[in-house]
Image: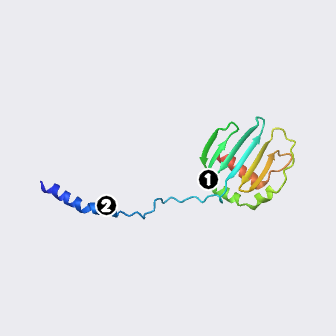
Amino acid sequence: MRAAPAVAAAVAALLIPLAGCARTDAPTSTLPQATPLPGVEVVLIKSGGIVGLTDTITVRADGTWTKTDRAGAERDGRLAEADLDRLRQLAADPRLTAEAAVTVPATMCADAFSYRLTIGPTTSSYVDCPPQATPPAATAEVVGLLTRATG
């Protein structure tokens, strides 16, 4: 019965030098990495209404977002992959550049919401006043996506 501890000690003595030979070139993660937005933040400012709100939604290139209200309260989250993919498509949409070049006319609507969308160097805006004008399509789609996705 005394031979078993001696054999175990001998095997351990032979294996200790091999402990440093573990592979270190194995991948650390097999999860796919999200493709970021094209290096830009997306910022949406919604203001106005009866209560005079000002909400700011900032989406970073990796899809994480922060929503800040007029009192400074913040909420954070991450866009669902489908929403992030759609936002990437919209961020590259040439209609946004064309919409940014249009001058927004003054509105006669009381208590309407104003939206100001900035994607990189491009800023477009509109006032949600349906009888006066139709919102710019691509800008309105981004506004709808961000409003829905960030609650």
Q: Residue at x 86, y 44 (%)?
A: 107
Q: Residue at x 81, y 38 (%)?
A: 111
Q: Residue at x 58, y 58 (%)?
A: 34
10 Å neighbourhood of mark 1: few (<14), some, or many (≥20)? many
Identify the residue under disc 2. 19
Q: Amino acid at mark 1?
A: Gly
Residue 151 visible within the image: no
Which mark lies nearer to you, 1 or 2? 2
Residue 58, percent across and down? 67, 48
Please name whichever residue, 121 or 133, is drawn nearer the observer in this view of the structure. 121
Q: Earlier in the sequence, mark 1 or mark 2?
A: 2
10 Å neighbourhood of mark 2: few (<14), some, or many (≥20)? few
- Seen in the picture, residue 61 relative to 75 is either above or below; the reply is below
Q: Using the image, tell me which numbered label, if any, was put on residue 109.
A: none
Residue 9, percent across and down? 20, 57
Find the residue positioned furthest to the left. 1
Find the distance from the CA under tag 1 to the CA under tag 2: 41 Å
Q: Using the image, tell me which numbered label, if any, was put on residue 63.
A: 1
Residue 30, percent across and down? 48, 60
For the residue labelled by badge 1, is the local secondary structure a helix, a strand or a loop? loop
In the image, 5: left or right of 85? left
Total marks placed: 2
Please name whichever residue, 130 or 108, is drawn nearer the observer in this view of the structure. 108
Q: Quadrant of residue 36?
A: bottom right
Q: Amino acid at mark 2?
A: Ala
- Report the quarter where the C terminus lies: top right
Residue 25, percent across and down? 42, 65
In the image, 88: left or right of 3? right
For the residue labelled by badge 2, is the local secondary structure a helix, a strand or a loop? helix
Please name whichever residue, 78 or 15, is drawn nearer the observer in this view of the structure. 15
